[in-house]
Image (cartoon, grey):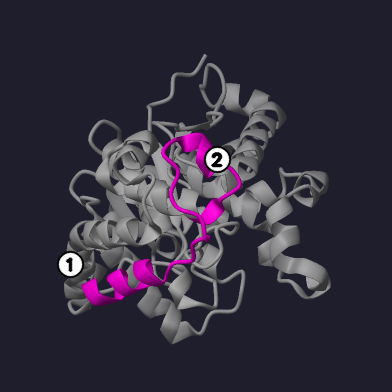
Amino acid sequence: MTTFTPRVFSGMQPTGNLHLGNYLGAMLNWIKLQETQECIYCVVDMHAITLWQEPKELHKAILEVTAAYLACGLDPKRSIIFNQSQVQEHAELAWIFNCVARMGWLNRMTQFKEKAGKDKEQASVGLYVYPNLMAADILAYKATHVPVGEDQKQHLELARDIAGKFNLDFGDAIREAGYNGDFFPLPEPFIIGPATRVMSLRDGAKKMSKSDPSDLSRINLSDDADTIARKIRKAKTDTDGLPSEAAGLKGRPEAENLVGIHAALSGQSVEQVLAQFGGGQFSRLKEALAELSVAKLGPIGRETRRLKADPGHVEGILADGSARARAIAAPILREVRKIVGFVVS
């Protein structure tokens, strides 16, 4: 059997500002992983254009998201940080995977149905097949682990299906190429603890989202201290006071959300937060959460704004990361070309 080098891959789209949900739900885990794992972190700009993006705004957004990556604590010396479109192997492998994946698999992808809505006949082909590109993102590096949230588990399963079918379909060619086993690994989800699920500050039943039309629904990582505090104070609550035990949060999504955010930012459990604030009014929790959020996120916002003011530095980091990413992906794709039967000079 083939032994694969442990390697982590993950990415975010450059559409809108990164927000508190991205930070608590994904970024903190990414930062921890780079301490112990070989990590590749991508700004997935090719995924972004499955929906129309104004070109100048997309270019700006790629640099802004990269700046936020760096400001949060991703280290370009420890991790490879790059934007997807600078590594052509993603697109080439995605085409090969378009020819490996089955229509029935893609028809089961719930995110396409959600994003396309009732106008799926008007949706881009890219939006339909982008799970194949996601598989290529991972497997171009033979990544073995992917930090994923609930909404991406189905896509990781598809990546495993594609890898397995490629290994099966081209098994003879893989062996002839000198591999004693599979060519691609079946990537696993990387779970290093319960990620915080951060909900909208205006509706506790919805995830915090870049696409929500109300800026008050989220805390952007680029927000200044006054904006952060104002959004926390305006966050929706219910009419009851805070419970003293976690069971009392059931059926109260806004209360659960604010307590959960405080717990995640302070490094405490929900029970510890309620021991401090339970039995009191929301105003006391909100004031403490506003102060805590400013202390934790304020420096990230300042560093993000500093990096955005120096786009040449950010572009240099992306160029270096792209070269390092290609050094891994190019030999893998060369082997893929041979295995599928292409003429390779």
Give me the residue at 54% from left, 78% from top.
213
In this picture, residue 18 sits left or right of residue 341? left
State the image quarter where residue 113 is shown.
bottom right
What is the count of numbered marks? 2
Left or right: 57 as drawn, with respect to 28: right
Query: At 54% across and 63% down in the image, what residue appears?
Result: 47
User: Is residue 218 shown above or below 170?
Assistant: below
| Quarter of the view holding residue 43 | bottom left
State the SS at label 2.
helix
Q: Real-space Cα distance between discs 2 and 1?
A: 41 Å
Can you tell which of label 2 and label 1 is closer to the viewer?
Answer: 1
Give x and y (percent) for residue 246.
Answer: 47, 36
Q: Nearer the viewer, residue 298 or 95?
A: 298
Q: Under tag 1, what secondary structure?
A: helix
Quick check: is 239 in the magenta stretch? yes
Question: Is mark 2 in CB contact (under 8 Å) with mark 1?
Answer: no
Foreground of the two, 70 or 208? 208
- Which label is found at residue 303? 1
User: In the displayed structure, does residue 112 sit left or right of residue 43?
Assistant: right
| Mark 2: amino acid | Val
Q: Is residue 1 above or below residue 343?
A: above
Asked whether residue 288 is in view, the answer is yes
Residue 301 within the segment the image draws in magenta:
no
Query: Can residue 343 be seen in this snapshot?
Result: no
In the rendered image, which residue does mark 2 sit on?
Answer: 336
Image coords of residue 165 (percent x, y): 69, 32
Q: Residues within 10 Å of mark 2 (few under 14, many from 20)?
A: many
**Image quadrant in which you'd find residue 298:** bottom left
* Position in image of residue 51 (x %, y %): 61, 73
Magenta-drawn segment: 225-254
Q: Residue at x 56, y 71 (%)?
A: 49
At label 1, the amino acid type is: Glu
